[in-house]
Image (cartoon, rainbow, N blue to C red):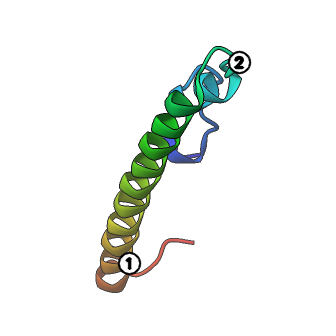
Amino acid sequence: MDADDLPRPKGDAASKLAAEDLGPYSQDELQDRIRLLEDEIARVEKHRLKAAAHRDAADALFGRKE
């Protein structure tokens, strides 16, 4: 089993964010947080697409491992 196939530890950044109490935040702070998270989603998606293209190129060159 590849390391990439293993589940992420429960203490990763996304899990910590999801568990955070949002009660103390103001409306403006919540809106800022949403913008930051949307920017992070776009960054992660860009990286995912780049990694997928890299993988596709390697598969085309070397054949896909089953």
Q: Helix, strand, or loop for circle 2?
A: loop
Kindly identify the residue that appears in the image at 31 percent across and 74 percent down: 58
Q: Identify the residue position indicated by label 2 in the image.
A: 23
Q: Residue furthest front?
A: 27
Q: Position of residue 2 (x, y in %)?
A: 52, 46
Q: Mark 2 to mark 1: distance in Å? A: 44 Å
Q: Position of residue 31 (x, y in %)?
A: 52, 39
Kindly identify the residue that appears in the image at 60 percent across and 22 percent down: 16
What type is the residue that disc 2 sits on?
Answer: Gly
* 2 or 1: mark nearer the eye: 2
Question: Could you say which quadrant of the image residue 55 lies in?
Answer: bottom left
Q: Nearer the viewer, residue 49 or 17?
A: 17
Residue 63 position (above or below residue 25):
below
Q: Position of residue 20 (x, y in %)?
A: 65, 19
Tag 1: Cα neighbours inside 10 Å, few (<14), some, or many (≥20)?
some
Question: Could you say which quadrant of the image residue 35 lies in?
Answer: top left
Q: Identify the residue position indicated by label 1 in the image.
A: 56
Residue 16 position (above or below residue 55):
above
Kindly identify the residue that appears in the image at 35 percent across and 58 percent down: 47
